[in-house]
Amino acid sequence: MDLMTPSFGLTFWMLVGFGILFFLLKKFAWPMIVGMISKREEYIQEQLSAAEMVRQDMGRLQAEHHKLLAEAKEERDAILADARKVRDKMYDDAKTKASEESRKIIEEAKKAIHFEKMKAVTEIKNEIANMSIEIAQSVLQQELSDKKKSEELVEKLMQNIDLN
């Protein structure tokens, strides 16, 4: 049982050794350890502060990113709206121009048809006049071939003429 209970001398020297070790540690090592721990604590605190600043910067950058993205979307929408307006204007202009051209073509066609109609009517009138002259010539030749009939015709015409 001696192994379980140490003797008084051993305990005394262990306490003296521990006291000397404690004194030396307290005098030389403890300030260095505390200084290193406080430096480490300051370093960790600085890193936490820097991480917080980075997090805030990231939040600010993310907000700027969202703002720029919203502005880009607005600008895209404005450009698309302008493009639609230009497209609609071009379509309307082309439609108006086509309508104007078709109206001009129809007017020119109507004029051409009227001109051709008048030309045809004139030709028919001229043809009828020529035929009437030819018929009158042949009738007069037959009527005037006989001298007696020709004299009667002349007298009849003379009576119809009013000499005022």
Image (cartoon, helix red, strand yellow):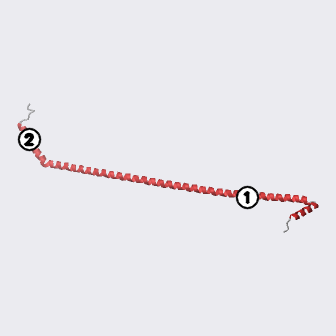
User: Residue 159: image x %, image y %?
Assistant: 88, 64
Secondary structure state at the residue bearing disc 2: helix
Q: Are marks 1 and 2 in contact (CB under 8 Å)?
A: no
Position of 3 compared to 66: left or right? left
Point out the frontmost of discs 1 and 2.
Answer: 1
Above or below, 45 relative to 126: above
User: Which residue: 78% across, 57% down?
Assistant: 124
Please rate how many residues cluster around mark 1, counting C-alpha atoms within 10 Å: few if below 14, some from 14 to 19, many from 20: few
User: Which residue: 81% across, 59% down?
Assistant: 129
- Residue that mark 2 sits on: 15
Return the disc, 1 or 2, that comes first in the chain's sequence: 2
User: Which residue: 12% across, 47% down?
Assistant: 26
Above or below, 155 relative to 46: below
Quadrant including the C terminus: bottom right
User: Disc 1 versus disc 2: distance between alpha carbons?
Assistant: 145 Å
Q: Quadrant of residue 7?
A: top left
User: Residue 99: image x %, image y %?
Assistant: 60, 55
Secondary structure state at the residue bearing disc 1: helix
- Residue that mark 1 sits on: 118
Identify the disc placed on residue 30: none
**160, 14: nearer the viewer:** 160
Please rate how many residues cluster around mark 2, counting C-alpha atoms within 10 Å: few if below 14, some from 14 to 19, many from 20: few
Q: What count of labels does the image hold? A: 2
Quadrant including the N terminus: top left
Position of 40 compared to 110: left or right? left
**164, 16: nearer the viewer:** 164
Q: Residue furthest bottom?
A: 164
